[in-house]
Amino acid sequence: MTGELREACGVFGIVGRPDAAALTAEALFALQHRGQESAGIAVLDEGAIRLHKGMGLVHEVFQLEDVKRLRGEAAIGHVRYSTTGASRPENAQPLYVRAHLGPFALAHNGNLVDALHARDRLEREGAIFQTTTDTEVVAHLMARSKRQSLEEAFQDALRQLSGGYAFALLTPGGVLGARDPFGIRPLVLGRLHGMPCIASETCALMAIGAEYEREVAPGEVVQLDLQGGVHVLTPGDASHEKLCAFELIYFARPDSRCDGESIYLARRRLGQQLAMEAPAPADVVLGVPDSSLPAAEGYAAELSLPQELGLVKNRYVGRTFIHPAQHSRESGVQRKLTVVSEVVRGRRVVLIDDSLVRGTTMRHLTRLLRDAGAVEVHVRIASPRYLHPCHYGIDTSNRDELIAAAAGEDELKGLIGADSLRFLSAQGVLRATGRPDHCLACFTGEYPVPVAESEI
């Protein structure tokens, strides 16, 4: 994708398994695409909570001996990138807290839009924060709660906050999972040999051999007890669901499923819809690996054009959105993708990407294709123009960074060096994904969860 977006974090939790830590580590490997800054696992061992976390990829943070030391019958895990809070060790999750109601560990995916206001209030009341994450706001609200249990304190804290989120909470009683009232961020429930687990994506369930059971409903809070029971503490309501469209467009792994729908097939249909809305005069279709390849397949099939491997990805270079500075992203792009000149030389190329956010990658790719002999380069984007910042867990809080917000389509075409440029329509996204609604705020500016004017 040409947006260099930082993704939504990944969370996982499981109970009733003596190998809970090892299973959690395996699940985090499957969720690595959702966060590459840090990783962590917290385990419950006879009422005590122990934690291991650090900066880096899962395999860098967890060696075999680290996992063996994390003995316990329940665990939660987290892979992180930062939207709120800097990329530094103290912000790695899960967060561990010793509260008057008992110890707990907390892992979070998403953003709380009113976290700064809540933090200011808590600091005025004497709270001392150890991190710069919005997740710690929830921890402080729980620690100060007058409720009678951690489970009640957690629900009480969530009622005081809003945003797009999915939480995994480890307590002496098991694991709690929670999803925001609009279901902007995903969370699924599964079972492994009768024992329940929660995960950001179904690919994490498949990685450990667990069966998918259902989606955690928007606004729902569930408890997974140590005996394998699942209790609904706060009922959910799917009638106003606004799942982030970028989960289907880009974030989720193609082998994951969303509400029973294959992410791969949804992306293929995005490409087919794009072909119907914006056909290009071309000889060959290329997709930007890897997330755009299904859309390229659909586009090529709809127009009866050949799709070929014209771009090769160096799989030992991390995703460019993880780099904090623009110059770092640009050097990462140059190392990451190369062109098979035999595929493009003397041909009109249509290049399919899933989104255009900052434009760093696309400028580089159009130049590479022309240098390799492409006579025309037509760019087609399998999502609408990204015009508005996201406040629910995508690292685009600054509108000035969004290339499509500063220029019209013709000017954008010149900025990225393309012969033509077209985007999929917002209605096309809904038709292709087969869902009546999504959070499309980054495309339309219609925010399902109100955001303070100062934050937009």
Image (cartoon, grey):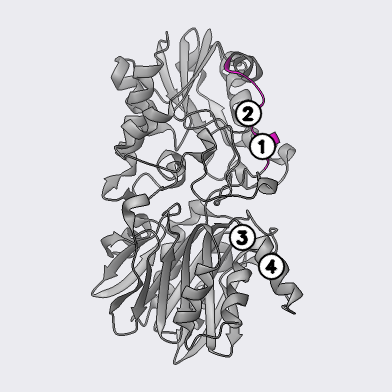
Whole-percent x, y for residue 25 in the image: 45, 68
Task: Answer yes or no: is residue 154 visible.
Answer: yes
Whole-percent x, y for residue 244 in the image: 45, 46
For residue 401, side relative to residue 355 (left or right): right
- The residue that appears at 47% across and 78% down in the rendered structure is 170
Q: Residue 263 carries which label?
A: none
Instruction: Answer with mark 2 or mark 1, whichever residue precedes in sequence.
Output: 1
Measure the alpha-carbon separation of dots 3 and 1. Answer: 28 Å
Looking at the rendered structure, the secondary structure element under dot 4 is helix
Residue occupied by mark 3 = 56
Span highlighted in magenta in the image:
398-409
Label 2 close to label 1 by CB (< 8 Å): yes
Label 3 close to label 4 by CB (< 8 Å): no
Q: What residue type is labelled 1?
A: Arg
Whole-percent x, y for residue 151 in the image: 44, 80
Instruction: Answer with mark 3 or mark 4, whichever residue precedes in sequence.
Output: 3
Front residue (pair 271, 301): 271
Instruction: Answer with mark 3 or mark 2, whichever residue precedes in sequence.
Output: 3
Q: Which amino acid does label 3 sit on?
A: Gly
Query: Viewer-nearest of labels 4 and 2?
Result: 4
Instruction: Answer with mark 3 or mark 1, whichever residue precedes in sequence.
Output: 3
Residue occupied by mark 2 = 405
Looking at the rendered structure, the secondary structure element under dot 2 is helix
Measure the alpha-carbon separation of dots 2 and 1. Answer: 7 Å
Looking at the rendered image, the quarter that the C terminus falls into is top right
Specify whether residue 416 is painted magenta: no
For residue 129, side relative to residue 139 (left or right): right
Residue occupied by mark 4 = 119
Measure the alpha-carbon separation of dots 1 and 4. Answer: 24 Å
Measure the alpha-carbon separation of dots 3 and 2. Answer: 33 Å
Q: Which mark is residue 399?
A: 1
Measure the alpha-carbon separation of dots 3 and 4. Answer: 27 Å
